[in-house]
Each structure stands twice: as structure tokens, then as C-alpha cells.
Amino acid sequence: MSILSPIIDKVLPPRCPLCGEGISAQTGLCSACWNKLVIPGEPCCKFCQRPFDEDEVKDDSICAVCTAKPPQHNGIAAATLYNEASKQLVLALKHGNRIALAPMMAHQIAAKLPVLKPGTLIVPVPLHRSRLWSRGYNQAAILAEELARLTGMMLVVDGLVRRKSTPFLGNLDRRARSSALSGAITVNPNRREMIKGANIVLVDDVLTSGATSDACISALKRRGAKSVVIACFARVLDEIF
């Protein structure tokens, strides 16, 4: 904790970033808003951690999505399931310049990560330079930096590059998203030797259809990455997407 924290708290009393209620520290939420977040747990799919109802599963159960199309990734570590509360936090970080939320959000992601092997690389989903210039920062890179600090693993902030600008994907169906991302993301030529044979944590703020993460994973595995675990703050399930 910073030695200036008491002074900052006196000048700017801590407030919950969701509801504005007074809280004890500059980072975190009030108890009511913590309770609005949905934290994924077990039982879940052994591949993608999609939650199951307890009476529907056995050990090592696989969800219908992964059965129909085995995933490229090696697991998903999602801090929360996407709902109105997690949406507000994501938007505040992504478009509201609330980068001070990143440590709290990264702590929640870190709690869901598997035990990482020594030498694991932390790689953020990249932004195209035009979007980076307009926004001023890459929220995935900020979360990745915090995760690297929390885990002690190496941050490779430029491990992936987005070679072409893509349209807003939220209004596109799965096929259109895949088409828009075709050839858009690649491994940085200067990082190819680092990526080869590495275990990687791919970091993003939100996991929606998986088109962007799939493009990243494809690029990483083409260059020899051994495994790729997706780490995100909020995960959108197909059932609510």
C-alpha cells in the first residue's frame, strides 16, 4: 500500500466504482456490488470451464460446445460471468479511462488461473494502432501487466500484433467475425523465438464468441506455442449472448 494512501483517501474519499457508495479503500467495490458479480465455479466443463448444474454432470464432463468443436485453447480462467455489474466495470476500464480498476480486476482473474509453469508468458490481445491511438491505451495490456506482477511471470506486451483494423465485432455473427479477423492477428516477428515452445496466458477484458481469442491462439500455436490459457475478467456464455 502506498504511504500516500491515507492522504489520497482524505482528499478523495473512496467510492464504489459501480454505485458510488463510500468504501474503505480506493480499490474494490462495496459489499452490495460485490454480490452482483457472478463468479464461475464448479462443476464445469473440463475444457472450457463452462458452468454446469450439479445434477447434470459427472467427473471430467465436457460441455456440448466443446464436444461439437474441441477448443484450440488449453483452458479458460474467467473472473466473472458477463452481467450488468461486470459490464459496467469493463466499460469503465475500456472506454471510461478508469485504469485504476485494473489491479482489482486482475486480482480476480489471477484467483481463477491454474498453477502456472515456470517461464509462462503473459500476452495481451492486441489492438490495431489506429484504435490504440484513439483510445490511448490497450485495456488488455494493462490487465496483462497487472497479472504479470501478481504471478511473477514475464509480460510480453508485444507478443501479438494486429496487422489490420477490424470492424466492431459486437454486431457480427460468428462467421462474419471469423472472416473479419482472418489474417488480422499474428505473432510479432521479433518475439517468435520466445513464443516457440512457451506456455502462454492470453489476456483480454471480455471473452464473447471467442473469435478474437481463436485468432490469437491460432497465431501463437502456428509459431509453436505449447499451450494457451485464456484469462479474462468477464465471460459471455452463449446462452446469454
Image (spheres, grey):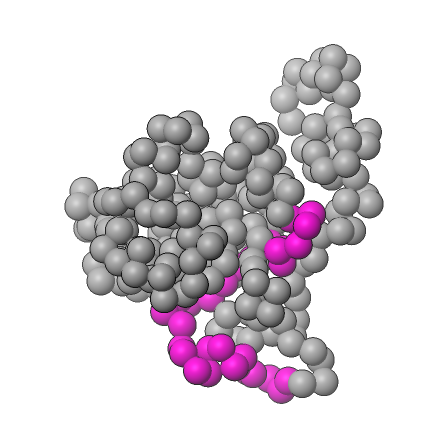
Q: Is residue 234 above or below residue 31?
A: below
Q: Split into 4 quadrants, where in the image is the C terminus?
A: bottom right
Q: Is residue 176 above or below residue 43?
A: above
In the foreground, 12 or 130: 130
Q: Is residue 70 above or below residue 33?
A: below
Horizontal side, residue 63 vs residue 7: left or right: left
Q: Specify start and end residues of the magenta stretch as a single range.
A: 57-86
Tell me if residue 85 is in the magenta stretch.
yes
Q: Split into 4 quadrants, where in the image is the N terminus?
A: top right
Q: Position of residue 66 (x, y in %)?
A: 46, 77
Q: Residue at x 82, y 29 (%)?
A: 22
Q: Residue at x 43, y 30 (%)?
A: 135
Task: Mark yes or no: residue 116 visible.
Answer: no
In the foreground, 1 or 129: 129
Q: Residue at x 50, y 56 (%)?
A: 207
Horizontal side, residue 44 vs residue 187: left or right: right
Q: Position of residue 86 (x, y in %)?
A: 64, 48
Q: Residue at x 47, y 38 (%)?
A: 139
In the foreground, 205 or 102: 205
Task: Mark yes or no: residue 65 visible.
Answer: yes
Number of numbered markers: 0
Tell me if residue 176 is in the magenta stretch.
no
Q: Is residue 50 above or below residue 223?
A: below
In the foreground, 203 or 132: 132
Q: Position of residue 151 (x, y in %)?
A: 49, 46
Horizontal side, residue 183 vs residue 29: left or right: left
